[in-house]
Image (cartoon, helix red, strand yellow):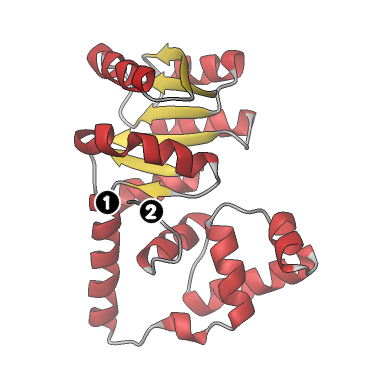
């Protein structure tokens, strides 16, 4: 069973999500939190596999709560539930360690696939979010009048990019590619420089823009 903690300050949202998960096979709601502080406390006590985290919560916002929840257990997956579709929120969520980002008005349709995606180590975005990210990227490329920097990467750098964007550690990527973790870190540094990326959150967004990782149905 996939153990799920729901964190949202609206009781009706928590009830709706609980009813949804009760209909999905292999999923169990182990707790509900109405504040960010409560989400952090219950995550420590209940040790869920996945936390569904609202962005706007009292006492502690969902972004900071996400960071604290993942500091407890980095293998845990957090899916952000939000009404905000702009990239600044997405980037902050990814920087905190979230692996999924769903809009509240489409959560019912996407939740099951999102859960299974993040449990397998892959990011998931509501289709509308993924489309916005791609459109923003295309517009930026046109404004800068530059060609696709992805073509600057070697084949090995492209492989490392995909594995890291899927949530693999340097050690895991090294085992899959049969190279050393040091070599993976070297490729990571090189590709980040070529693509002008500065952290893992930006790397994941880039991979989504380029459809390097699956994000939706």
Outermost residue on the front side: it is 25
Horizontal side of residue 142 vs 63, given as left or right: left
Considering only vertical position in the picture, is 165 above or below 59? below
Q: Are marks 1 and 2 in contact (CB under 8 Å)?
A: yes
The residue beneath circle 1 is 127
Q: Where residue 215 appears, x then y in whole percent?
A: 38, 53
Quarter holding residue 70: top right
Quarter holding residue 10: top left
> Of label 1 and label 2, which has the lower sequence position?
1
Outermost residue on the left side: it is 105
* x 32%, y 46%: residue: 89
Q: Which mark is residue 40?
A: none
- Label 2, secondary structure: give it: loop
> In this orientation, which residue lies closer to the viewer: 191 or 129?
129
Quarter holding residue 209: bottom left
- Label 1, secondary structure: give it: helix
Considering only vertical position in the picture, is 93 above or below 159? above
* x 29%, y 13%: residue: 15
Q: Is residue 156 visible?
A: yes
Q: Where residue 134 appears, x then y in whole percent?
A: 29, 65
Q: Is residue 83 visible?
A: no
Q: How many marks are shown on the rendered structure?
A: 2
Q: Where, quadrant-wise, is the N terminus in this rendering?
A: top right
Q: Where residue 182 appears, x then y in whole percent?
A: 78, 67
Question: For the residues marked 1 and 2, what is the alpha-carbon distance in whole angstroms?
Answer: 7 Å
The residue beneath circle 2 is 215
* x 41%, y 28%: residue: 52
* x 40%, y 40%: residue: 114
């Amino acid at each position: 069973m996939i153990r799920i903690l729901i964190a949202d300050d609206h009781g009706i949202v928590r009830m709706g999500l609980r009813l949804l998960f009760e209909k999905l096979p292999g999923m169990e709601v182990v707790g509900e939190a109405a504040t960010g502080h409560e989400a952090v406390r219950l995550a420590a006590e209940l040790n869920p596999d996945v936390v569904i985290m609202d962005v706007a919560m009292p006492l502690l916002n969902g972004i900071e709560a996400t960071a604290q929840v993942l500091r407890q257990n980095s293998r845990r997956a957090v899916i952000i539930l939000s009404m905000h579709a702009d990239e600044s929120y997405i980037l902050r969520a990814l920087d905190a360690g979230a692996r999924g980002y769903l809009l509240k008005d489409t959560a019912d349709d996407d939740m099951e696939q999102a859960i299974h995606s993040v449990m397998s180590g892959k990011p998931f975005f509501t289709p509308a979010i993924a489309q916005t990210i791609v459109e923003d990227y295309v517009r930026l490329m046109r404004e800068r009048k530059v060609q696709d920097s992805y073509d600057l990467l070697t084949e090995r750098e492209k492989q490392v990019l995909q594995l890291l964007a899927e949530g693999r550690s340097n050690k895991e990527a090294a085992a899959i590619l049969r190279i050393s973790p040091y070599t993976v870190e070297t490729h990571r540094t090189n590709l980040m420089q070529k693509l002008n990326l500065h952290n893992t959150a930006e790397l994941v967004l880039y991979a989504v823009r380029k459809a390097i990782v699956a994000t939706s149905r």
